[in-house]
Image (spheres, grey):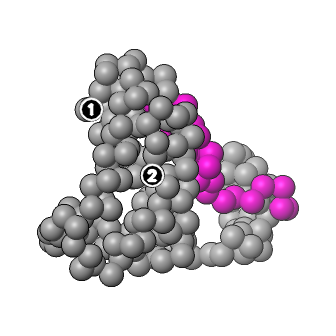
Amino acid sequence: MVFEAPGARTSTWLPLLGDVARPRAGHDWQGEMRARAQTMRAVFTAHPWAPALVSGHINLGTTTLAMIDAILGCLRAAGFSYVQADHIWNALDSVTFGFHLLDRTLPLKPDQYAEAARPFLPLIDPVALPHMHALSTMVADGRHDGLNDFGFVLNRMLDALDALPRLG
């Protein structure tokens, strides 16, 4: 566990957090949080080692504190309570970190899905497993890419969070 004094710049990965979009209060909260998640994902893609360092340390540096304050301010301005804002921020980060982990550990590259699906089709009984067979056939035929879609999940999550009653 690393505790970083406010203003200290001892961590080599800390500047990466400065590349993550900082949400602005008073703007479209969904757009602000979407931009934050997308830029965080881009930083993680460019620096695959970063998530383990970011999540594995308690960082109390000015960059992190300013980001947290901006997130809370954006969500509070949207009418969420501090508790709701904390849950929303952590839920969105969990999705972002989870997609990064999934992307890093899948055994196939995205352009290999169709080719990899074809040999498995005879092993998927279309009578016993009709839905799995149908989807696998779509991937094998190139009618569906079979990829995990970060944007889809992020947008559905933001929609669901927007439906929460504001307890602010």
Q: Residue at x 29, y 39 (%)?
A: 86
Residue 31 placement: quadrant:
top right
Task: Establish if 125 lies above or below 101.
Answer: above
SS under mark 2 = loop
Task: Establish if 165 lies above or below 28.
Answer: above
- What is the C-alpha distance between the residues marked 2 and 1? 18 Å
First to last magenta residue range: 141-161
Residue underneath mark 2: 22
Dot label at residue 82: 1
Residue 62 placement: quadrant:
bottom left
Q: Residue at x 41, y 78 (%)?
A: 49
- The question of residue 152 being in magenta is answered with yes
Earlier along the polypeptide chain: callout 2 or callout 1? 2
Nearer the camera: disc 2 or disc 1? 2
Q: Position of residue 75 (x, y in %)?
A: 39, 34
Nearer the observer, 120 or 155: 155
Q: Position of residue 141 (x, y in %)?
A: 85, 62
